[in-house]
Image (cartoon, rainbow, N blue to C red):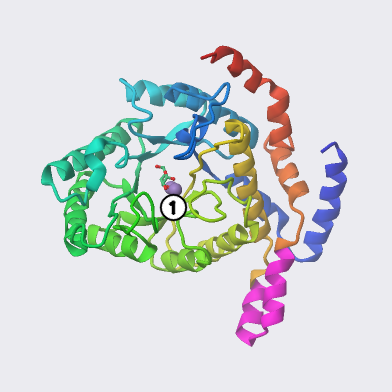
Amino acid sequence: MAIAWKEAYRLLADDLDARGVDIEAVKDALKAQRIETPSWGYADSGTRFHVFPQPGAAVTAYQKLADAAQVHKFTGVAPSVALHIPWDKVDDYGALQQYAASLGLSLGAINPNLFQDDAYKLGSLCHPDAAVRRMAIDHCLECVGIAKTVGSNIISLWLPDGTNYPGQDNIRERKHRLVEALTKVYAAMPAPMRLLIEYKFFEPAFYHTDLADWGMAYVLATKLGDRAQVLVDLGHHPLGTNIEQIVAFLIDEGRLGGFHFNSKKFADDDLTVGSINPYELFLIYNELIDGERDPAVDMSVAYMIDQSHNIKPKVEASIQSVMNIQEAYARALLIDRASLAQAQRAGDVVMAEEIVQAAYRTNVTPLLAQVREEMGLAPDPLTAYRASGYYERVCQERTR
Ligand code: AFD
Ligand code: MN
Ligand code: MN
């Protein structure tokens, strides 16, 4: 992307100006965007079939933060990193937080792990054995303690619990156990710490999942309190689900806590966000901007990536992910909302759709390049990262 992008930006700016777009406001919004990357996105991962180890992949929490710092260095909008416990367990979380700060990073959501212990075969917080439930609750309380130590205000909880066979357990009793357990966890969270409740329609259980959809997560959040909200993971819905509708509904109820951005083709594939259905991602951002612009709505959304980069180089895939999210937001910011509302009120279906699609069809690459230049960054983060030699260096340093 040589200097030609400058000319493309000049033409785009003229076009946007003619369309009545406040370009400076759009650029300010893009500069203010914040996207959290997951520590687990920098380490080797795989599927139940195989893990393909990659040279240079991070192993320690410190190495993961060093990689995450590269994503922030080249994109400028990824200053926080989600942790996963015990994958990121360290002796001194204060020291880890200081190391993150030395890299210009903060530690974000703390993710408990309720799926990788032999005791959890029949569930964790929903397990029929009170001793196992106690173990899972204590792990969540440990995560609350870590959040306090590192200055994080988010516990991001994915509940893997469920059953594999009809009759295996009592579904309503499992619901009661879950409410009882999470009430204890919620009580331990000091304000303004939030519990983001993540649902998933199947996996690892194959008959029923205790927190299977947004409605179950929403009801649970309302039972716990104002600082419990729903986390929408884009890979966690049956095929054909209208995710942007779920997002709009949760925004309107003040219960959209955050996202786990990724893409899926069939199930929870943890593919690069925007790589399968960029229009869906754009439509989700349309709902987010609609909510942000509504004074009656109070939004505090954690925009987090949740991906395991099984065959892509980790840092590159993370930079690509951030860029795809920036692109969706940039396009959605170009929607002429006044004309859209007018067309909607008039029932002008074609014009309303055309207004939305006109924004989607806009090539925002030059706009994002201009924003990055104004932020003191290279116009194309991926090219700049590849030229930096970071990957070659860590491949040398992190020899196995
Ligand atoms: C898996 C789960 C869920 C969770 C993530 C990190 O499906 O999305 O948030 O791992 O634990 O993808
Ligand atoms: Mn997730
Ligand atoms: Mn997932």
Q: Secondary structure at mark 1?
A: strand
Q: Judge from the rendering whether residue 327 lies leftward or rightward of residue 144; answer left or right.
A: right
Local packing at callout 1 (Cα closer than 10 Å; few below 14, some 14-19, many 20+) is many
Rendered view: 263 above or below 16: above
Q: Judge from the rendering whether residue 284 lies leftward or rightward of residue 163; answer left or right.
A: right
Q: Locate residue 13, reporting x and y percent.
A: 80, 54
Magenta residue span: 338-359
Q: Locate residue 303, reporting x and y percent.
A: 49, 48
Q: Tell me which corner region of the image, top left, top right, bottom left or bottom right, holds residue 371.
A: top right
Amino acid type, callout 1: Gly
Q: Residue furthest left?
A: 130
Between residues 251 and 395, which one lies in front from this camera angle? Answer: 395
* Magenta region includes residue 351: yes
Residue 124 in view? no
Between residues 216 and 357, which one lies in front from this camera angle? Answer: 216
Q: Locate residue 96, reporting x and y percent.
A: 39, 23
- The residue that label 1 is drawn on is 258
